[in-house]
Amino acid sequence: MKPIETEEQYLVYLRRLEENFQAGPDNLPSGEPLIAEINEIAALVREYEEKHYPIRTTWRVKLNIFLFDVKFQLRRIRKKLLQGNPTKPNTAL
């Protein structure tokens, strides 16, 4: 399939995806060709949306993601340090 170039093509692909999702698992034709088609259309739609409808994140969102990651990494380090000898307190932290 070709990349989506117009809004009309985008809407046609969205309708095709919607038809497949609303049909339900019992009414869908099964098989690899259909799954491959859905995956390909979804990838094309995602690419078009990222280009034409980007979700802008603010610096606050980026900061929260960064702080969450730092907190997670510190917990992993602390857990590894405490696994060495759980009865003896670790003074390295």
Image (spheres, helix red, strand yellow):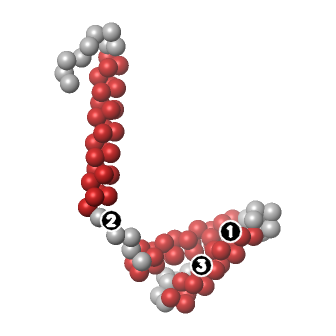
Mark 2: which amino acid? Thr
- Residue 58's disc is none
**Horizontal side of residue 2 vs 87, given as left or right:** right
The percent coordinates of residue 4 (x first, y second) are 50, 84
Residue that badge 1 annotates: 21
Q: Which residue is at the front of the view, 79 or 29?
A: 79
Going from N to C along the chain, the mark reached first, 2 or 1, is 1
| Res. 73 image quadrant | top left
- The amino acid marked with disc number 3 is Leu
Q: Nearest the camera: 4 or 21?
A: 21
Q: Residues within 10 Å of mark 1 (few under 14, many from 20)?
A: few
Q: Secondary structure at mark 2?
A: loop
Q: Residue at x 52, y 76 (%)?
A: 45
Residue identified by numbered label 2: 57
How far across and down, in percent of the image, does residue 63 sit? 26, 54
Neighbour tally class for label 3: few under 14, some 14-19, many 20 plus, Cα within 10 Å: some
Label 2 and label 3: CA atoms lie apart by 25 Å
Of marks 2 and 1, the one in the foreground: 2
Q: Badge 3 is on which residue?
A: 14
- Locate the C terminus and report the quarter of the image it occupies: top left
